[in-house]
Image (spheres, rainbow, N blue to C red):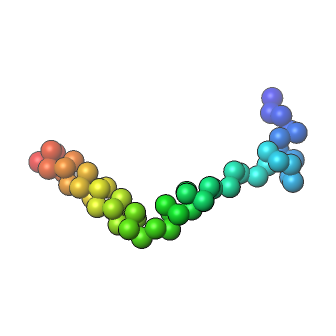
Amino acid sequence: MTNIANKEPYQQAYYPPAPTGFTRFMRTCVLWQLWRFIVINVKMLKLMAKSH
């Protein structure tokens, strides 16, 4: 059985938590995004190299 009290609109539990300042910075920092892009691509290349 679900708890209806937590699903009512405009209650505190209804809204998701807001990101912190550091989280917002990491999401918008171009250098961090570039670094993560490189790391993920290297991981994919290693995975493809193992499969062949």
Is 17 on the left-hand or right-hand side of 3?
left
Query: Which residue: 50% across, 68% down?
Result: 28
Query: Which residue: 88% across, 39% down?
Result: 5
40 and 32: which is toward the camera: 32
Q: Residue pushed farthest top?
A: 1
Q: Position of residue 36 (x, y in %)?
A: 36, 59
Q: Above or below — where is 1 with respect to 51?
A: above
Q: Residue pushed farthest front?
A: 22
Q: Position of residue 6 (x, y in %)?
A: 83, 41
Is 46 on the left-hand or right-hand side of 19?
left
Q: Residue pushed farthest left?
A: 52
Is 16 on the left-hand or right-hand side of 23?
right
Quarter of the figure with the N terminus: top right
Q: Position of residue 49 (x, y in %)?
A: 14, 50
Q: Above or below — where is 9 with respect to 24?
A: above
Is 40 on the left-hand or right-hand side of 51?
right
43 and 36: which is toward the camera: 36
